[in-house]
Amino acid sequence: MIRKISILVVLILIVSSATNAQYNRMFSARAGATGGAGVVLTDIWASSYNQAGLAYLDGLSAGVYFSNAFNVADMGTKAFAFAFPAEKYGTVGVNYTYFGNELFNDSKLALNYSKKLGKRISAGVQIDYFMTVQGLDYGKRSVAVGEIGILTNPAENLYIGAHLFNPWRATFSEAQNEYVFSLLKIGAGYNFSEKLILRLDVEKDLDYSAVFRAGFDYMFVENLFLRMGVSTNPTQFAFGLGYNFKGVSLDLTFTNHQVLGYYSQFGLSYLLTKADK
């Protein structure tokens, strides 16, 4: 039992450092397939990467996500997101993520709002409530964190965005100096055609080296997408498939870690209704 707990703790630490996001677990199989580049996403998965993208939703949207890190059941992340756009007033959304098991788990409940500020610009904000549960009588701890993002369309087919996580440097415990990381991400995307999209992201934690992410979406058959990408620190390669049809989007992704091997991600989303004007 002790050996199992020790292995699980080591894996959690490795995954946390690899993703550079100990408390904010990103969820999007689509972005995962492009190396994690997702700042300019404009679908339901913008709930996780840059809430400003939710302002471009055409209607009520919902999505579910699951990842299985390195085929270890206790390392799974589950998430769902929901967003309701009212064209005149902006988009309101909620999302939830859960990672771990009864011995250790962390979760996040978030509420967001986004709105178009003009023809070519939108902004979004999100308030997160994080909670960590530690077994063996170590108790619970929680903290509130904020996010803010902006997305622009300065030229035809070109999108540029920025997102800041934890601008006020929230902390679990000032006495023990347990700060939640702050992370700035800047991204760009270019639609070369209806079939080919390229996305690039750069993210910088105050305490770690910059991470670069890049990938592409290519529609090689009607409604069927091939996606590939890469990220640095550590170097990871990803690939996946996506299928879109009549409001349904299905995404499956595999990512290769240099040391631990492959892990999978799955996402399903559905555009429910047209926006209420």
Image: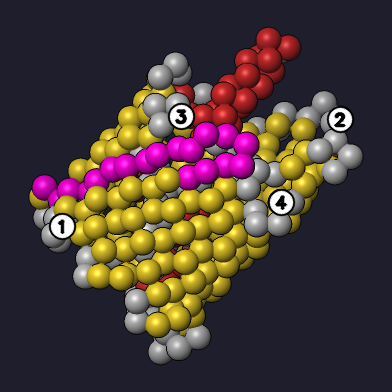
Which numbered disc, 4 or 2, marks the residue that appears first in the sequence?
2
Give me the C-alpha separation between circle 3 and circle 2.
Answer: 34 Å
**Quadrant of the snapshot with the N terminus:** top right
Measure how far apart labels 1 and 2 are at the Cα level.
Answer: 55 Å
Classify mark 2: residues with Cα within 10 Å, few (<14), some (14-19) or many (20+): few
- Residue behind mark 1: 192
Seen from the viewer's position, the closer of residues 61 and 111 is 111
Is 207 located above or below residue 84 in the figure? Answer: above
Q: Which residues are magenta?
A: 203-220
Spatial CA span between label 1 and label 4: 38 Å
Q: Are marks 1 and 3 in contact (CB under 8 Å)?
A: no
Q: Nearer the viewer, mark 4 or mark 2?
A: 4
**Could you tell me how far apart the alpha carbons at marks 3 and 4 are, in whole angstroms?**
23 Å
Residue 3 in view in this figure: yes
Q: Amino acid at mark 2?
A: Asp
Determine which residue is flagged by label 4.
169
Amino acid at circle 1: Phe
Tell me whether circle 3 and circle 2 mark residues in contact (CB < 8 Å).
no
Which residue, given by chain and number where applicable, does mark 2 sit on?
A: 137
Q: Would residue 83 be seen by someone viewing this image from the given angle?
A: no
Mark 3 or mark 4: name the one nearer the start of the chain: 4
Q: Magenta region's main secondary structure?
A: strand
Residue 141, position in %: x, y? 80, 43
**Coordinates of residue 41 in the picture (x, y in percent):** 37, 59
Q: Nearer the viewer, residue 172 or 204?
A: 204
Choose the circle earlier in sequence order: 3 or 2: 2
Evaluate if marks 3 and 4 touch, with contact meaning CB atoms under 8 Å apart: no
Which residue lies under the disc numbered 3?
A: 233
Q: Amino acid at mark 3?
A: Asn
Q: Are marks 1 and 2 in contact (CB under 8 Å)?
A: no
- The residue type indicated by label 4 comes to Arg
